[in-house]
Image (tube, grey):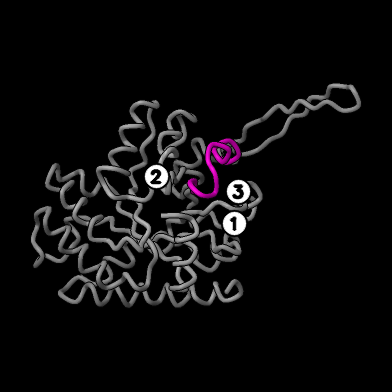
Amino acid sequence: MTRQQLIENIFFKRSYLCVGLDTDINKIPAYLGSDAEALFRFNKEIIDATEDLCVAYKINTAFYEVLGSAGWEAMEKTVNYIPDTHFKIADAKRGDIGNTSSQYAKAFFETLNFDAITVAPYMGEDSIKPFLEYENKWAIVLGLTSNSGALDFELKKVVTQIDELEEGMHFTKHQTSFLYEEVLKITSKWGTKNNLMFVVGATKADQLASIRQIIPDNFLLIPGVGYQGGSLEEVSKHGMTKDCGLLVNVSRAIIYAGETENFAEEARAIALQYQTEMKGYLKSYI
């Protein structure tokens, strides 16, 4: 999917909602069954109930891989069932040496029908580049996450040396920043706004303004609204651009809204609440 197609879909639907299909076999209604095929039956009803309210679906691959080959098949059936009008994200957090990443890219972009995949940038440019070589496909780089472990590395202060030449004289300056800010600055140069997104947790909304100074035009995938306590209002206020520039993911709050036979109807009701709120935030850009 191209950037322009994504933007057009957002403004047509008045929504930047991404529904997370982090489907846990232990949490779906019992009447659907307890095998891997039950995952697909559950996902199918969720998709049917929400497709007109969202622009993207995110599949967390771990919930499928845990069930072995049958789970992988359920994931493949799910991604093929999602309409091509929707942005399809594999939340797989891959990132390895170049030749291995090339195989991951082929798996998710050729063998499977995903538009994007989440990737970890720790191993550097050669681990991300293979995902950026596909036309109309996206790499979504982990930027600033909501988990407590973000304090271990992402929010560590680092000192960067800057060498400048002014009027024939050499000057050395030192700049202090967070590690995640350096990651954003460096990785944003590896691709373009047409193939590179970044993950920013919704509970980090207060940092979105400074993040937008670094990456003003890239789309952001925002998890953490819903059960994790992130504010859609704050995320929209600080992160939205004239092109919207946001995909806000909601998983558990939508897909587990109901526990009985009417779970899809209840999921739709919650999705509609988010879409209605999003429509309000988009008004000034329409």
Q: Quadrant of the C terminus?
A: bottom right
Mark 1 nearby-residue class (10 Å; few <14, some 14–19, many ≥20): some
Residue in the foreground of this view, choosing between 276 and 125: 125
Label 1 sits on residue: 206
Q: Position of residue 44 (x, y in %)?
A: 20, 65
Could you tell me the amino acid type at mark 3? Ile
Q: Would you say 90 lies left or right of 276 here?
A: left
| Residue at disc 2, secondary structure | strand
Could you tell me the amino acid type at mark 1? Asp
**Residue 120 position by quadrant:** top left
> Does residue 89 show up magenta in the picture?
no
Could you tell me the amino acid type at mark 2? Thr
| Residue at disc 3, secondary structure | loop
In the image, residue 16 sits, relative to residue 101, either above or below, namely: below
Q: Position of residue 18 (x, y in %)?
A: 39, 62
Image: magenta residue range: 184-197
At horizontal 20% and vertical 69% (from top left) the residue drawn is 45
What's the mark number on residue 215?
A: 3
Q: Earlier in the sequence, mark 1 or mark 3?
A: 1
Q: Position of residue 256 (x, y in %)?
A: 26, 66
Label 2 sits on residue: 118
Residue in the foreground of this view, choosing between 156 and 129: 129
How far is disc 1 from disc 3 in space, using C-alphas? 15 Å
Q: Would you say 126 lies left or right of 188 here?
A: left
Q: Earlier in the sequence, mark 1 or mark 2?
A: 2
**Residue 276 position by quadrant:** bottom left
Residue in the foreground of this view, choosing between 236 and 286: 286
Q: Earlier in the sequence, mark 3 or mark 2?
A: 2
In the image, residue 118 sits, relative to residue 39, either above or below, namely: above
